[in-house]
Amino acid sequence: MPATVIEACVSIYRDDATDEMYESLLSEAMDEIRRLQRVTSYVSGVPVRPASLEAMPPYIPRATGSVGESGFRADGEAAIYVLPQNIARLPSRRDFDAAEMQAFDSFLSRSDGAFSGYLASQSEARAALLHRGDARSSLLASATACEVFLDDFLKHLLWEQLASPEGCLAMFVEKSAITTVLTRTRKELGPLIGGNWNDHTQRDLGDWQACVARLRHRTIHGGYVPTLDEARAALDASDRLRDHAAGVLVRRLKKFPRTALMLIGSRALEARGQLTKAVRCEIESGGAEQWGERFVRWRKCLAGLVERELEPFSPDQRDAYLIGIVTGRGRLEFVRHHRESGLAANAELLARSQSIEHLEDLAAAMPDGGEPISIAVHDDVPTRLTEDWVAEHRRLPLCGVMANGADFY
């Protein structure tokens, strides 16, 4: 396995060297090594993984000596310099307890669900900082985590309040431009859930702007290189942003129990003594996986609406599937479904086929009161759209997005 061996030499102009001095000299040596690596990469065109103290072994050979007229003379044998923070990060096996296994299964089942982007970015920010010493990547990941968190928080609250994706579009697009996360946070969260969401007066929001958002702007647009301390502060600010949201949310558990379960979790709510009647009802319903999937589709639908608002798109119905939907005895409707864009529209048949006749027979035998079923028609049957394209959940079963199941509006 390829390995890199680093040998560095520094000068000490005093006899009583201390561990603190060695630590400072080692940091300076690492800075110089990274500078040499960057220049080498510029010349060779080959990307280089920067060296860092965080990626070093916990034990480093160290030797001291004196330089005189006869050259370098070692003071003795090599000693070991210990990086205690790296010892603490050595991998070790730890089995999950029952509660952790439950949390593991929960996260596994909603790997793309609410707050998953926040958790992924937070994990990357910590890994970049603790294991690679990469302050820039860590800070940018923390900035991403903050914005993704605030957006998911707002969207989940809107979804649980039974807002339709179409009804939320104006919050995200204004004058043919996407609104900023800061604007949405200031304007929308207060009326929706209460609490202080003004970054000028709320400390955690203010630190998000000062320690994360503005540094991200300087880093991306000005080439600024953040320090490790700044990366640590950004990570701390992103944690406190989540804690602020959770603190506001626990005062609205009756209105937003699902958001509380997704963000805080049942065990944390129980530990706080805040497993309210509304929260218990959601837990006992056993429907978390289903409504978690509905939220993901709701969020995706809103993203599609935003995209089409900025760049209008209308599918050609010839590129859309023809779907027959049986809603009850003798009730058969036809819909064109453009899967790539998530759009659908009611359609009128301009011809018949054997598949259509089979669908009509099925509809005639279908009992009333059951769930709608949808069947793809593979025959090339011409149709005429009877309405403009709308989001697919408004016309097709199994595509539901609304928290209460009222999708056909």
Image: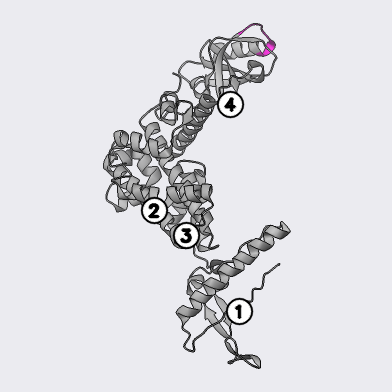
Residue at (53%, 83%) from the top-left corner? 12
Q: Does the magenta-highlighted stretch encompass residue 156?
A: no
Indicate the secondary structure of the residue bearing disc 2: helix
Looking at the image, do the residues carrying marks 3 and 1 touch, with CB atoms under 8 Å apart?
no
Instruction: Judge by depth and name the residue closer to the eye, 326 or 137.
Output: 137
| Distance of label 3 from label 1 (alpha carbons) | 45 Å
Q: Residue 43 location in percent, x, y?
A: 71, 59
How many residues crowd mark 4 within 10 Å: few (<14), some (14–19), many (20+)? some
Kindly give the residue lying farthest to the right in the view shown: 44
Q: Does the magenta-highlighted stretch encompass residue 352?
A: yes
- Considering the image in quadrants, where does the N terminus appear? bottom right
- Determine which residue is flagged by label 3: 96
| Distance of label 1 from label 2 (alpha carbons) | 38 Å
Q: Amino acid at mark 3?
A: Phe
Of labels 3 and 2, the one closer to you:
2
Of labels 3 and 1, the one closer to you:
1
Sequence-first tag of 4 and 3: 3
